[in-house]
Image: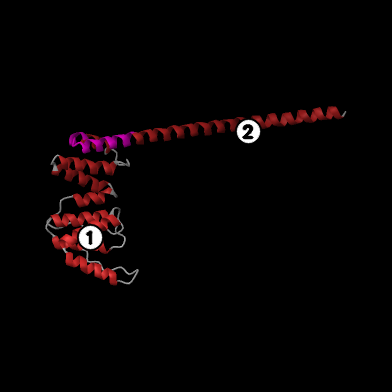
Amino acid sequence: MSELLREIEDDIKRERYDKLWHSFGKVMVGVSLGVILVTIGVVLWQNHKQVRAMEKTTEFIKGIDRLNIEDYKGAIAVFDALSEDPSSSYYGLALLRKAEAQNGLSDQEGASKTYQQLAQNDPVFGELAKLMLPGNNADVPKPRKGAPFYYTQSEMRAWRLLKLDARDNAIAQFLALYRDEHTPYSMRGRVQEALQYLAPERLQAAIEQEASQPSGQAPASDEGD
């Protein structure tokens, strides 16, 4: 009798499992297949993006090689292709290098247009492009404190002011960099050398002021206009 009851219980369990399978089993299989297909799709897309990124890196290196051997036309062709997509991580770098190649061909007008394009479309490298645009007399814009490449822009500004015969403003910019405790060490060395040549007495005054300044207190800036 007990054997018969066990068989009946087993039959009831099987019927319950069959009902559960018909109710949820096929749905779970479908969900599992969907997850697998989505995972495969994501992996394939990531692989595609990685391959494209590697291709762009290879092209960028190729463009640099063209620049190094002074094949400026070949470099421009490479960087033109890399700058077709404004969302690309190489967009800003490619335009900077393209302008460098155009300058190598003495195409100042073309380089200026490239810098203008970069200044309008790239929030990071565009700040550098603005400094490379020709200024009116000594009208060279100041970099914004905290902007990307602030110190690089500041040094470039000083050299451009000097090139435009705005000597006093250039010295003031160099002094502002020298007095800024956050200026990169190697840049501070270049700035000190420039000041040693341009205005040794003002450099000495800055050194003496720095020596007498209480620790942690920043000296007043005299950055030029």
Where does the image place residue 94, in percent across and percent down from the top left? 26, 41
Residue 222 circle label? none
Q: Main secondary structure of the magenta part?
A: helix
* Quarter of the figure with residue 5: top right
In this picture, is 79 found above or below 172? Answer: above
Q: Which residues fall within the magenta stretch?
A: 55-74
- Give the residue at mark 2: 24
**Residue 171 as seen in the image, left or right of residue 44:** left
User: Residue 144 colored magenta?
Assistant: no
Name the residue at 23% across, 67% down.
Answer: 206
Q: Quadrant of the C terminus?
A: bottom left
Where does the image place residue 220, in percent across and percent down from the top left? 26, 69
- Give the residue at mark 1: 192
In this picture, is 159 found above or below 57? Answer: below
Residue closer to the observer: 187 or 114: 187
- State the SS at label 2: helix
Q: Quadrant of the N terminus?
A: top right
* Quarter of the figure with residue 214: bottom left
Where does the image place residue 124, in percent across and percent down from the top left? 29, 49
**Residue 59 as seen in the image, left or right of residue 19:** left
**Residue 150 as seen in the image, left or right of residue 113:** right
